[in-house]
Each structure stands twice: as C-alpha cells, then as structure tokens.
C-alpha cells in the first residue's frame, strides 16, 4: 500500500523566505609518464587545442626550470606539462609530502604586472573555496627566487580535447557519465558563488579511473564580489563562449551551462554545433541562431538526449536549465530510463517545477503503509465510550471558553490583521505594518507568548468566531484593530480581548499622520504593554524602544514590500517586494530589517524558481542585515531559514539559537531549530527543540503535531500517539489529529483502531488520501471489497496520483482480479514516470516503481529502482522496508531478511510485517519467526 505522507497537515507557519575534497595527488606516483598532451591545468587564457609536442615558449620555460630544479627547497621540477601566454604548468614532486603535483608559474617578465598577478591570486582564492572530487584541488600560493607559483593536484589522465582527437565521439552513455561529473563540479562551484567562464574540453580532464576533473578557474568570477573584468569585457575562449558572454553582458551560472551544452554536443557527435570559417564567426552565429539539434547532425544520438543538449544551448539564459542541479537531474533520469521519449524532456522543460512542502513525515507509504485517507463514518464513533477511548476527548474546562488557556497560566497573545475602513489601497500596508511592528516588539518580551504572524494570517483567513480562532492558535488574548482615514490623517482603534473569560481588557483610539507612523507605533506599543501589565527589563526596553530606521520614506517602502509578500506569492509579487525593499535600502542603506525582508523575498523566489542563485542572494542580504543590527531576532530567523534552505544546517542552528536569545518564547524559532537539527541527523537535539516549542506554547496544536511527527519519524510511536491525541483535543474540528492518530495505529499494526480515526477525519474533511488510508486499513484486515471501494473513491478524487492508483491495483490483485490489477499497475507505472519527469531524484517514486514492477514479476526493473531509491535516501526507514518487500517478491530471501532486520532495528513495526502479504514467502520460515519475536519485544 502507499502512504501519501502528511498531506493532512497545513503548510509550515514559518515565514517564506527565500564533502571534503577528494585528494588524488598520489594518482600519478609510480605511473607511466603521461604524454605531453596530458597536463593538469591549462594556461589561464586557455589553449585552443592540445599543445604541440613542444613550442618555442615551452622550450624557454623548460630551460628556465629544467628537470631536477627545486623551487623553495621543496618542489622538484620533473617536466613541462603545458604553456600559454601567462606562463606554464609543470609536473613536480612535493618532496615534503612525497607526492606528485602540478605547479603553475607566471612568466617572470609578467610577474610584475599587477593585473596578471591579481588574476593569478584570484584563481587561488576562488578555487580554494571549492572542495569537490570533480574539481581540481588547489593547494597553495608560493614564491621562490622571485617566482610566483600555485601548487595543485596532479591529474594523471587526458583532457577531453585530446580524447576527442584520438577517440572520436563517445557513446551516449559515456557522454552522459562525463557531463554528469562536470555538472557536479559546477554545482559545487556555483554553490560557492563561483562561475567558471572558460569551460571547454581542454579544461576538463579524465583520469585513469574515469574520474572527471574540471580545472583552470583563472577566469572564474565570484557572483558575490566584482570580478577581475568589467561588464562588457570579452573574456574566455571564443569557441566556447555563451551568447551573453560574447555580447559582454553580466554573466551568471547559466553561462557555464551553455558551455556544458557545447561540450556535450561535441562528445555525442564529434562535431561542433556552430560550424564557421573562424572562431569569431562561430561566436556571432551563437548570438543569432539556434543550434541544430544533435540528433539532426548524428542520427545515432537519442532524441531525448538531443532535447537536453538543445536546452543547454538556448540563446536566452531564461530558457536554459537554470542551474547545474536541474540539468544533472535530467541526465540521471535519462541514465535510469534510456528509452524515455524526447517528448518527456520537452514537457519537463516547458513545465515549471513543482514543490510540495510537508512538515511531518507520515507513514512514508509503499508496500503496505498507508496513504492518508478519507472515509465513511462508522457506528463505532457514535458510541461515546469507544470514541473517548480512541480520541481521549478533552476534559471540560471551567472557563467561559473551553479549550482556551486560562489567563492565570500565562499571557498568550495573537495580533490579528487590522481591518481597513476606507481607502484599502493606501492604508492596507500601513495597517499590516503596524500589526507586524507590534508583534515584533512583543515577540522579544519574556513575559508574553506571541503567535507567529504567518500562523495568525492563515487562521484569520478562515473567518472563524473569536473563541474558535483563539483555540486554533493556542492563545487567550487577542488584539484586534481598525485603521481608517487617509494617508494625510490616520485613526487607529485597538481592542484587546481576554477570550478565556470573554471580556474586553483594553480599548483605545490613536490618531496621527502617516509621516509620524513610527511615533504612533511607539505610543501604541507603550499603551499595550501597560494594558497587558508587563514589566519589560531594561535590556528589553532598549531593544524594543529603538526604531528600525529613522527614515520614514525607507520605512514606508519596507512596509509596502512586506505587504507585497502577503497572500498568494508569485514571481510578480516577489519582484515587487524586492523593488520596495531595495528602494528602502536606497533611502537608508543601514536599514537591517529591509535586508531581512530582501532575504525573505529572495528565498521565496528560490522556492518558486528553484534557481540556487536566489539562495546565494538571500544569504548575502541576511548576512548584511545581521552585520547592521545583530540584536534583531527577525534577522537571525531569516538567516537561519536561508542557511537551512542552502543545506548549511550547522550555521542555521547557530543563527536560530541566537534568535532564541532575543525571543526566548518563540515556539516558531524552536520548531525551525528542530527542523535544522533533524536535517543534520541529530535526533536528541531535534526532539529537545520541538519539546521546547511545546513548552513555549502548550496550547497551540501545531507544536504538538510537529513533535508527534518527529517521534513518528524516529520510530517512537507511543510518544507520537500521545502528541496526536493532544492535537485532537486542542483542535477537535481539524482532521489532522485524527489522520495522524490513525497513521500511528497503522504503524503499530492496530488496523481496527486506525479505522475509526480515519473515519472521523473523513467526517470533518473528505479527502482522497484519507480514503486511501482507510482502504489500506481494510486491506490489512483482508476486507478486500471494502478496501477496493475506498481506493476507487480515492482514485476518483485524485486520478493523477500514482500512489493511489498503485493501492487500487494492490487491492484488485489480492482480491483475485488479476487482469484488472495488471492494467491498473500499468496506469500507476505511467503516472510514476510522469512524477519522475518533475522530480527525477524522488526516492519515494522510485520505491513505488520498484514495487509495481516486482508485483508484475519484473524483478530486473524492480531491483534497479529500489537500489536507486536507497542510494538517494539511504537512511529512510520506509524505503528500507520496501527493499525487503521487493527482495521477497523477487525471491532474494537473504537480501530480504537483511533489509527487514535493518528496518526493525530502526523502529519499523514487526506486526505490520507479520501481516504483510508481500512478505508471504518469508513468513513461514524460522528466520522470520525469530526476527518477529526478537523485535516485537522491543517494540513494546
């Protein structure tokens, strides 16, 4: 069965923002001396072809440093590897470390030129930031006897230009494997903000083991700093320049991908796509014409690969792959499915990427794990005793509003979006800005707990009665307000309600002009603190008393930027927000909050476009905000989110901890901290952070749901169940708690208990995933007719969902409807391939495919896909269990037992395995009985 993940959960309420290197220096020691064309690094300018046996310049250089010369009492020159206008590259031996290296030297007559020396240093500075096995390792910058040189990894192999010359074109598989490694090298460089700008066959080496190494960053430029050359300067090698490079435009990582396309074309066809009499004429053709498809030049090139190459060679960078990762995904998809149609890649190019955020990993599905469901209301729910046993109905509260925390338990505040009376266009951003400013100030006080603005925005959009809204957010105090008037004259009316007792605490009216908005905010905040009976510390008063900026024009632009990011975000609204933030910074370059806003917009743009350039911009903006004002919790939250999105989890943890020192009651910050710890595999720290979020606000159901999800993911199902029961108590009108309760019962093998939980969820909100989860529970109870009805209902609601289709096929198969099962599996397989076109590295979808093929008797494809899934997600518990199922279905008993034991060790339910029909071939064996007995004891 399939499980859709936590589709029942709402999106995260966090604001939307935006390995060590492989040292192969020993490769050449003791090896046969490579031919003259096999050098480690070309000259900085680049050579149009492999060097002649030896040129006059090389002879002069060889005479300058003949074999046996020792530089700096350490580097023994062995021979000249290559030379160019700036200098030469030698093979040398590092006597201190006893290894072969490549040593690049500036010609003595040029060493005094500051520009050339700067280029030399730039290669070292930029390349040393990149540590990846497919990027040549740069060791150090040295000087001996007035000679400047760089030492680097020596690669014992040949460059692609030489290989093409004596080997000719490559097979599609070989070419793909080469380009994949080039993409990984570029991905590492681009992640550090470095673009190569001179990628060509001469700068790509292949060693004796097939490893590809990209080298010569002599013209490389950092995206974060001004490069050596100015916009408009023509740099690089003419034959491999992108159109924008030829036109002197500003370059980004997509320029490197055009060069990858040129190299890929040549590897596949043995020819270049823009044939002309001169290099300059070829360059001009690139700016005016589309490349002829590789498959038109050579019909042995698969059309699907030709589509990939053509997309790399689009003249407009916006129409190319936007980053190396996207190109790599398509190459890996082709490698996994060489027979894939060209149309599939064409559709992938035309369709924007899809991204689904799931904050809690529910039963990860497959095999026989559920898919979130929706069902029929069972009579069991009509029996109060049974219902209470399952859902632990919350005890009656003695307050006016049950479920809302009593004020004596603490001050839990939600600042609702203020209503605008009058000119919505000119006052909306003022109203939102005032509300956010008050939230941000209260956020930093020890005595009060403030609901995050994004959670409030989502809850307020449901237009609920105040008591229900308070229960949903876990608060007892609600601040409401209206803003009316015009830009010249404002009137703000505020009301503070104690929802726990149903009484109004405070109400006041404020008036002023928009030019005095900052002063008005101070007045409102001061009165609100008094109404809440708070006693801020001196340090808290200092932090909340300062203005983010004294420039009202800058502040006005900032508020409009934040307003543009509210509601449904898209590229246009985010671009508008960026313009407002940039205008704010134009008026006040020291406005830290505007940098935080810009970082948030950049990260949101990354989520829309999947272009990693936006994460780089977000990091820079957030870092600048931190430099300007390290005492703003918002800045550290933004930076933590950016680092998390960039995979820099250690730095994310550091920033989120700093945010919590400034906002110690922020459950949102604790949840983000838990996410960062979880991403880095730190179970204890992750759970502790989620528990702290619950402590910060135990009345907000989402905190319990997040903690329960973590327990579930880590295999602690009993603790997960307690948290999900709490979710159902705090939010009884939300289906989430019931769906996740059913998921836990399912994981524990208590399918009969799971059924009423799913049925209750369906009563609240019918949903295809919950129907499928209910069908899965029936399936495990061998109630196949009821199971089929539920799966058919799920597929009817979501006909394009391959997991739902796969579950229906499973039910047909087990009920004996063989022909219908086979046809439905084929539909599921087709839908799964469509999913892989969107995300070629989806381990979950590959696991699905493995099981579909295994159930159809195609062991070869099943084994291929489960191995790929395990490679991508080696620690995923559910995929490990699917591996056991695939091997059991394929007759590989030893492998099946090995995977099954690994799954049990990580907390998978032995009860589920004991009743899993896909493990039928194992269930009668003594080894299986022993495993079940061993781990069933542990699971209880």
Image: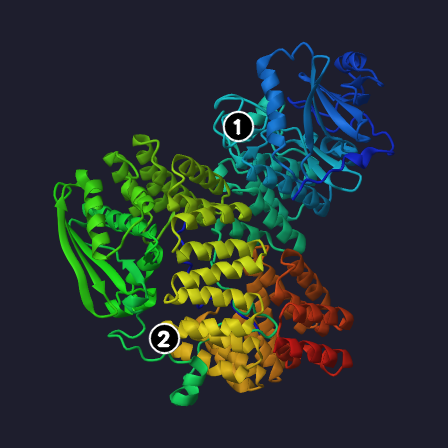
Q: Is residue 886 visible?
A: no
Query: Above or below — where is 150 with respect to 735?
Result: above
Mark 1 highlights which residue? 245
- The residue depicted at 32 percent of the width and 43 percent of the height is 543
Label 2 vs label 1: CA separation?
A: 60 Å
Seen in the image, is 643 located left or right of residue 57? left
Which quadrant, please, contains the N terminus?
bottom right
Q: Is residue 770 visible?
A: yes
Q: Which is nearer the eye, 555 or 605?
A: 555
Residue 401 falls in which quadrant of the image?
bottom left
- The residue depicted at 75 percent of the width and 13 percent of the height is 57
- The residue depicted at 78 percent of the width and 23 percent of the height is 75
Q: Position of residue 554 (x, y in %)?
A: 28, 35
In the image, which disc is placed on residue 732? 2
Which quadrant, please, contains the C terminus?
bottom right
Q: Which is nearer the eye, 2 or 647?
A: 647
Foreground label between 2 and 1: 2
Tell me the crowding category of disc 2: few under 14, some 14 to 19, or many 20 or more residues within 10 angstroms, Cα based. Answer: many
Residue 628 falls in which quadrant of the image?
top left
Q: Position of residue 393 (x, y in %)?
A: 38, 80
Q: Position of residue 32 (x, y in %)?
A: 87, 32
Q: Position of residue 726 (x, y in %)?
A: 42, 73
Seen in the image, is 214 located left or right of residue 797? right
Tell me the crowding category of disc 1: few under 14, some 14 to 19, or many 20 or more residues within 10 angstroms, Cα based. Answer: many
């Amino acid at each position: 069965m399939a499980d859709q993940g936590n589709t029942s959960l709402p999106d995260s309420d966090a604001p939307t923002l935006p390995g060590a290197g492989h040292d192969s220096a020993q490769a050449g020691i003791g090896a046969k001396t490579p031919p003259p064309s096999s050098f480690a690094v070309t000259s900085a300018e680049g050579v149009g072809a492999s060097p002649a046996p030896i040129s006059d310049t090389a002879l002069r250089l060889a005479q300058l440093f003949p074999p046996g010369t020792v530089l700096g009492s350490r580097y023994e020159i062995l021979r000249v590897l290559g030379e160019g206008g700036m200098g030469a590259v030698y093979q040398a031996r590092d006597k201190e470390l006893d290894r072969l290296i490549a040593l690049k030297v500036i010609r003595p007559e040029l060493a005094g030129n500051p520009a050339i020396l700067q280029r030399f240093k730039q290669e070292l500075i930029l390349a040393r930031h990149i540590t990846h096995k497919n990027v040549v390792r740069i060791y150090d910058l040295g000087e001996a006897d007035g000679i400047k040189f760089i030492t680097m990894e020596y690669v014992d192999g040949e460059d692609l230009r030489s290989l093409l010359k004596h080997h000719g074109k490559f097979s599609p598989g070989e070419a793909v494997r080469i380009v994949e490694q080039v993409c990984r090298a570029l991905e590492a460089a681009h992640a550090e903000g470095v673009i190569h700008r001179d990628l060509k066959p001469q700068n790509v080496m292949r060693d004796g083991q097939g490893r590809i190494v990209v080298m010569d960053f002599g013209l490389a430029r950092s995206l974060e700093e001004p490069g050596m050359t100015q916009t408009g300067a023509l740099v690089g090698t003419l034959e491999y320049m992108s159109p924008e490079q030829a036109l002197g435009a500003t370059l980004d990582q997509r320029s490197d991908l055009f060069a990858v396309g040129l190299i890929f074309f040549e590897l596949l066809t043995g020819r270049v796509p823009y044939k002309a009499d001169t290099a300059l004429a070829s360059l001009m053709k690139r700016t005016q014409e589309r490349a002829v498809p590789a498959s038109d030049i050579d019909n042995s090139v698969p059309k699907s690969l030709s589509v990939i190459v053509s997309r790399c060679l689009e003249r407009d960078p916006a129409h190319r792959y936007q980053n190396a990762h996207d190109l790599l995904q398509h190459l890996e998809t082709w490698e996994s499915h060489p027979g894939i149609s060209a149309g599939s890649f064409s559709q992938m190019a035309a369709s924007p990427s899809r991204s689904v955020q799931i904050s809690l990993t529910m039963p990860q599905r497959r095999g026989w794990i559920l898919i979130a469901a929706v069902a029929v209301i069972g009579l069991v729910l009509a029996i109060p005793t049974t219902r209470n046993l399952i859902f632990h109905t919350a005890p009656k509260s003695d307050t006016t509003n049950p479920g809302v925390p009593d004020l004596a338990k603490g001050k839990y505040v939600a600042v609702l979006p203020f209503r605008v009376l009058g000119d919505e266009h000119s006052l909306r951003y003022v109203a939102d800005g005032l509300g956010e400013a008050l939230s941000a100030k209260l956020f930093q006080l020890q005595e009060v707990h403030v609901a995050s603005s994004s959670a409030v925005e989502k809850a307020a959009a449901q237009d609920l009665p105040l008591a229900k809204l308070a229960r949903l957010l876990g608060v007892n105090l609600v601040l409401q307000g209206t803003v009316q008037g015009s830009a010249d004259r404002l009137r703000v009316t505020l009301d503070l309600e104690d929802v726990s007792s149903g009484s109004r605490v405070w109400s006041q009216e404020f008036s002023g002009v928009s030019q005095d908005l900052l002063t008005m905010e101070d007045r409102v905040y001061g009165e609100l603190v008094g109404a809440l009976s708070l006693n801020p510390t001196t340090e808290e008063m200092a932090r909340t008393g300062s203005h983010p900026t004294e420039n009202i024009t800058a502040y006005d632009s900032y508020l409009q930027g934040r307003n543009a990011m509210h509601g449904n975000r898209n590229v246009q609204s985010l671009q508008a927000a960026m313009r407002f933030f940039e205008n704010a910074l134009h008026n006040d370059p020291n406005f830290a909050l505007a940098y935080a806003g810009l970082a948030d917009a950049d990260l949101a743009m990354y989520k829309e476009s999947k272009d990693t350039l936006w994460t780089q911009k977000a990091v820079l903006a957030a870092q600048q905000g931190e430099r300007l004002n390290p005492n703003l919790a918002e800045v550290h939250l933004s930076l933590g989110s950016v680092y998390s999105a960039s995979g820099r989890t250690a730095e994310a943890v550091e920033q989120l901890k700093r945010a919590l020192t400034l906002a110690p009651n922020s459950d949102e910050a604790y949840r983000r901290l838990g996410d960062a710890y979880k991403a880095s595999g730190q179970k204890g720290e992750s759970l502790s952070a989620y528990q702290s979020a619950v402590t910060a606000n135990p009345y907000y159901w989402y905190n319990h749901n997040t903690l329960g999800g973590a327990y579930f993911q880590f295999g602690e199902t009993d603790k997960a169940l307690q948290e999900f029961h709490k979710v159902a108590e705090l939010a009884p009108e939300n289906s989430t708690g019931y769906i996740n309760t059913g998921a836990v019962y399912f994981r524990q093998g208590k399918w009969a208990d799971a059924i009423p939980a799913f049925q209750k969820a369906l009563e609240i909100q019918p949903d295809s995933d919950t129907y499928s989860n209910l069908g899965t529970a029936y399936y495990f109870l061998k109630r196949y007719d009821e199971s089929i009805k539920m799966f058919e209902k799920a597929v009817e609601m979501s006909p394009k969902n391959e997991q739902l289709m796969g579950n229906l096929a499973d039910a047909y198969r087990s009920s004996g409807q063989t022909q219908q099962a086979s046809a439905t599996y084929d539909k599921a397989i087709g839908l799964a391939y469509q999913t892989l076109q969107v995300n070629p590295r989806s381990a979950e979808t590959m696991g699905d495919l493995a099981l579909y093929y295994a159930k159809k008797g195609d062991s070869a494809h099943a084994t291929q896909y489960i191995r790929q899934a395990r490679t991508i997600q080696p620690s995923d518990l559910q995929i490990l269990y699917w591996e056991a199922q695939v091997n059991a279905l394929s007759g590989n008993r030893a492998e099946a037992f090995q995977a099954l034991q690994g799954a049990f060790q990580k907390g998978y339910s032995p009860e589920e395995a004991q009743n899993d029909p896909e493990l039928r071939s194992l269930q009668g064996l003594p080894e299986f009985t022993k495993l079940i007995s061993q781990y069933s004891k542990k699971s209880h």
